[in-house]
Image (tube, helix red, strand yellow):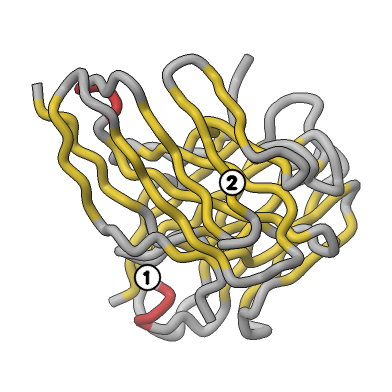
Amino acid sequence: DAGVTQSPTHLIKTRGQQVTLRCSPISGHKSVSWYQQVLGQGPQFIFQYYEKEERGRGNFPDRFSARQFPNYSSELNVNALLLGDSALYLCASSSSGGITGELFFGEGSRLTVL
Amino acid sequence: DQQVKQNSPSLSVQEGRISILNCDYTNSMFDYFLWYKKYPAEGPTFLISISSIKDKNEDGRFTVFLNKSAKHLSLHIVPSQPGDSAVYFCAALSNTGNQFYFGTGTSLTVIP
């Protein structure tokens, strides 16, 4: 079975631009979470979606938005990019909305903002 | 505010010996804890978890210990193998929340 897949794997943007990152969860998983990992830090929670509804949001500005589609895939959008948005963006899926089990992570999308 | 802390950024251990990775947390509402392992250019992979109703969980070479009064958990790897070399993150989940809080990670190097 395919794991969590993310695209693109690497991308370079300039300040002020917008970016869309995509994620396909493990088949059968209905929950998708997004995390930002800055170099030298642990992953920081951005969003969780379950059954196409936002279930949680971390301490990130409104420039960050996300959505989940009927097939449970998800997109993370970041507008008006700042240098500090440079990070590895991780998508994780789980089978339940309450996250009682572990998260399964994709390999991440490495975003560099110049 | 870092609610989950891993105060050792790195650890080196000889092959065959025990590796002990430590994690401290501040939020008494955390009731589920996990350890993740991360290789370069890969996403974190789940290793082992423990619920707050237990104080120990074992899975093969990996054992996690939880001391709730001290708000401390540790991961023991015995015996350590070179393939265990990776960054280890501990993560905690609140019984009221839906997000995991991760520590900053400990880079483990197992020397052959």
Label number found at residue B55:
none
Secondary structure at numbered mark 1:
loop
| Residue A55 coordinates in the image, percent (x, y) | 85, 61
Does residue B82 lie above or below B23 as drawn? above
Q: Quadrant of the C terminus of chain B?
A: top left
Residue at 80% in and 42% down: A100
Q: Nearer the viewer, residue B6 or A88?
A: B6
Against B41, residue B92 (above or below) is: below
Q: Residue at x 78, y 46 (%)?
A: A99
> Circle 2 sits in a helix, a strand or a loop, which is it?
strand
Q: Does residue A57 appear to the left or right of B33 in the view shown? A: right
Going 61% across and 34% down the picture, which residue do you hit? B56
- Extreme residue in the front direction: B69
In the picture, measured across the screen, residue A85 lies left or right of residue B48, that is left
Residue A33 against residue A114 in the figure, above or below: above
Which amino acid type corresponds to the residue marked 1 in the rendered image? Ser
Q: Mark 2 points at which residue?
A: B66
Between B33 and A26, the one lying in front of the other is: B33
- Image position, residue A79 (x, y; %): 57, 79
Q: Which of marks 1 and 2 is in front?
A: 2
State the residue in front, A1 or B93. B93
Crowding around mark 1 (Cα neighbors within 10 Å: few <14, some 14 to 19, many 20+) is: some
Read off the residue under disc 1: A86
Kindly identify the amino acid type of the residue bearing the numbered disc 2.
Leu
